[in-house]
Image (cartoon, coloured by chain):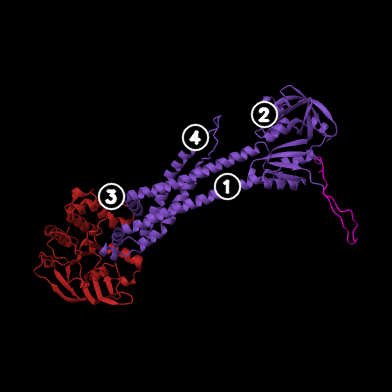
Amino acid sequence: MRFEVIVSLRFLREGRFQTLLTLAGVAVGVAVIVFLSALISGLQTSLVANTLGSQPHVVVRPQDETARRMVAEGEAAVAARVEKVAVRTRTLPDWPLNLTRIERVPGVVATSPIAAGAAFVVKGDVSKAVALRGVDTDRFDRIVNITGRLKGGRFRLDGNDVVLGVGLARDLGLGIGDKVRLVTEGGRSDVFTVGGLFDLGAKDLNERWVLASIRNAQTLLNLEDGITSIEVRVDSIFDADRMAADITDRTGLVAETWMDINRPLLVGLKSQNMSSWMIQFFVVLAVALGIASVLVVAVVQKSREIGILKAIGTSTRQTMAIFLLQGALLGLVGSALGCALGAVLAVGFRSMAVAPDGSPIFPVDLTWTRFAAASAMATVVGMVAAVAPARRAARLDPAEVIRYG
Amino acid sequence: MADPNELPTGEGPATAASVGPILRLEGVRKSFGKKVITEVLHGIDLVVNPGEFVAMVGPSGAGKSTLLNLVGLLDRPTSGRIFLDGTDTSTLNDAGLTRFRGEKIGFVFQHHHLLPAFTTLENVMMPLLVHRGSPDDEMRERARQLLVRVGLEDKITARASDLSGGQQQRVAVARALAMHPPLVLADEPTGNLDTHAADQVFDLLREFNREFRGAFVIVTHDLRLANRCDRIVAIVDGVIESDTWKTGGDRAT
């Protein structure tokens, strides 16, 4: 071991209570950081997962039609009001080609063509407005996992089978195997059999979604063989913007991301991140001030020893190193304790707060990189905090402290 | 070890390199203060040869400690030059001065000044550790032998703070010799000790002076001990008032 390491370790050991209190302070600070960041990251991950569990990451739809002014060029002073076309183009142009183009975009992991429109479900005297969605079961399962969230029946759309939400089934008193009539605005209608019931965890979807085969939806919605949108899943949700832009470039179609659709959620996540960073910053600041103050006191307490060390040939650089090392060691050891404490807190919190089904209400995200980052941060902060005390130690005049010490 | 009865000639193992005087002061002056300047030393000229055992006496405030700090390279003179082992110390920068001090000078302070966080062995090793950077068996053995020489082999693992004042000062003497320095400076090394412990420490300094052939400069108020040195330099009011060679000192001839 190097001379500087030996001396700084011994000085810390000599500090006893002072050292212990400082380590406890660093440990508490690091534990707060580890716990808080693990909790917030876990919450955010589960919040995003819950939100996106029943949503595609990107929806590709036709461009809005733009109305042009029907006025000849060169005529002066025309009062014209240009209104937007009320109904957008109903189907995607060249969709099989565009589907292939979208699948080629890097990062796209699943695509599902959708033929969707408004319809009514009629059961006896009751009718309810629903969103009829014609899907391919395999493809759609990869966008929104229906099979995994079935409450009864199965997710097959052969023949005239439909699959609908538990909310809608309850409203209309429907069960598996029951017959319903679907009516669209053009007066087209057909009778379908309820083949499965799903619960997506979102009331709106459970009450409004009726899934049918693409063929049946196309017929009812009078789309011929067109589809209305393509839903896309990507591998990295926070890169959805970039992939959507790529899709638009390749197809000329409009691509909306989950971020466009869930703007308030994203703003919420961002402000949560901000406040989390704020808290962590001030905790780090408090830890740094704690280390700095204890080392300033240590320099005063140890000034006689520092004087002796200098008299017997310890250089200014070695003296600096002794105190910088003490700061780093306080940070490193304190953060190791803090990581353990933070992990215990997080795991305890997770096991205390559980939903009735035993699943944790507060998911925590404990990864080793979080611990490594916290420890590295605390070590560097400890060393930086030690700079001022170390300089004081280095400036001590040995002649003076030996004479009066 | 050389025959202890042989006259010191400056050719002991630690001082083999030095042929001239180990210490030479030329017109050394030292002032303190910024607004009100007080000159404490008014031009000191002094030569100390290898192997000499010098007492520095004088009333309090005469400038003995100031002079010792200058000679010990803990401070720089306001003017004049100090040659240590042939090197003009005014040419060294602060880092060089620190290193030179560690190599050439052993200190024994009045308040023994050991490092309480370390054992006696570690305290004696410390100058070697500072110099070499990391501990090795050779320096442990050298420190152990020195502790044996000062009669503290049973206190090797004791904390410095658990020793009596006399024992601590003997450890300090051992530490001052760890680097085999050509010059040992002692600032009232027996000032805080009873007569018996003071004699023990003084005897050790004397013995080491004979064995290692290093020059010793000892600031003391104790005239009884001063009279046992080879040479007495008296400082009064910042000048050397007298410089006497003793024939009746305990130098064995």
User: What separation in Å lies between label 4 and label 1 (alpha carbons)?
Assistant: 23 Å
Are discs 3 and 1 less than 8 Å apart at CB? Answer: no
Q: In the figure, A20 relative to A355: above or below?
A: below
Q: Secondary structure at mark 2?
A: helix
Residue A352 is marked as 4
**The residue stretch that appears in magenta:** A66-92
Are discs 4 and 2 less than 8 Å apart at CB? Answer: no
Q: Are marks 4 and 2 on the same chain?
A: yes
Residue carrying label 3: B137
The answer to if B154 sits in the magenta stretch is: no
Which chain is mark 4 on?
Answer: A
x, y (%) of residue A5? 36, 52
Residue in the picture at 51% in, 41% down: A367
Q: Amino acid at mark 4?
A: Met
Magenta-colored segment: predominant secondary structure:
loop
Which chain is mark 1 on?
Answer: A
Are discs 3 and 2 less than 8 Å apart at CB? Answer: no
Q: Which chain is purple?
A: A
Q: Secondary structure at mark 1?
A: helix
Residue A147 is marked as 2
Residue in the picture at 33% in, 75% down: B34
Q: In the figure, A211 relative to B34: above or below?
A: above
Q: Residue furthest top?
A: A177
